Image (tube, rainbow, N blue to C red):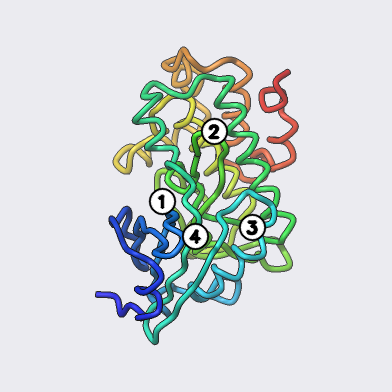
Amino acid sequence: MFDMPNDMLLRYNFINPTAKTNLGCVWEGVSRYAQQPVVIKASWIGGQVANEQSLENPVHEVRLLRHLEVSGKFPRVYDEFSTGTCHFYIMEPLGRDIFVFLDQEHKNGIPEKLCRRMFQQILDAVNVLDQNGLVHLDLKPENLMVDEKQVVRIIDLGQAQVPDRAGLVSGVWGTAVYRAPEQRLDEKYDGKKADMFSLGATLFTMATGCNVCTVDTRVAFLKMLKQNTNLDRWFAQCPQLSNSLISLLKGLLCYDPHARFSLQQAMNHRWVQGA
C-alpha cells in the first residue's frame, strides 16, 4: 500500500490503475479543481537499484522530466508530492502507448508512411536525450505514447543513465525482447548503441505488429543476428516491409554494437528521410 499525502488527495482524484512497475504504480486521475485528466505515478523512494551513473530515485526522474519537457518530446510534470517512503508525480496524459495503438487500430502493423512519421519523432526525442548527455535504456512500445494527432512522446526515464567519460554504462536494464545482446551484468557497454538496438526492435513491432522475438526465442534470434544467417529469409516473412525499411532494421539490429547504426546514421537513413 502507498502512503498517500492528504494534500494530494485533496487536489487529485484517483480513477483507475493503468500500470504496475517494479518501483510502483500508475493511475488515471482527475484534478479536483480544474476537472482535467491527469496521470499519477507513484514510485517507492530508494526502491531502484542505483549506481553512480543512474538516476538514484524518483525525485531525479521528475527533475529530469522538468528539464526536458520544454522540448515537447516528454510529458509535462504538473505537480509532485512525497512521503517518507514514496514519491508521487502528476503528469499530463499523453494518449495510448504504441502497443495499445497497434492492438486497437493496426494489428498487422502501422502503414509505412505513418510509421515513418512516428519513428522520426521517436528519433528526435532520443536526440534530445543525447544532447543532454543521457541514454534511456528502456525504449520499447510501452514507453512510447501516441495521441489522437499521432504525436509521439517518450515516457519512463526511471532507468536512464549518464554514461561515463568513455560513453559506457553498466547493468542489465530494460525489457528482454528489446534489450541489446551486449547488455550483461558482467561488463560495461555503449548505452547509445544499446538504445539503437531497442529502437530497431521497436520499429519492427511498429511496422509488423509483432515482436522480433519472444523470451523463449530470444537466444535463437540473437544467434541468427550474430551469425548473419537466414536474415533475409526472416525478413521475407514480413511482406509489408519495404527494402528501404529492411535496410534500416538491419543496421539497427546489428549484433555487433561497433557496426550498429548510430543515432545520426538512423536519422540520415533514406527510409527515415523518405527518399
Amino acid type assigned to the residue bearing label 3 in the image: Glu
Q: Residue at x 35, y 73 (%)?
A: 9
Return the x and y of residue 61 as percentages of the image width and height: 54, 68
Question: Residue 10, located in which quarter of the rendered image?
Answer: bottom left
Relative to 144, is 48 above or below? below
Mark 1 or mark 3: name the one nearer the start of the chain.
Answer: 3
Q: Residues within 10 Å of mark 1 (few under 14, many from 20)?
A: some
Q: Alpha-carbon distance for marks 4 and 3?
A: 11 Å
The residue beneath circle 2 is: 150
Return the x and y of residue 231 as percentages of the image width and height: 49, 23
Label of residue 175 in the image: 1
The residue beneath circle 3 is: 69
Relative to 217, is 189 above or below? below
Q: Alpha-carbon distance for marks 3 and 2?
A: 18 Å
- Counting labels gives 4
Q: Residue at x 38, y 67 (%)?
A: 12
Nearer-the-camera pick, 81 or 7: 7
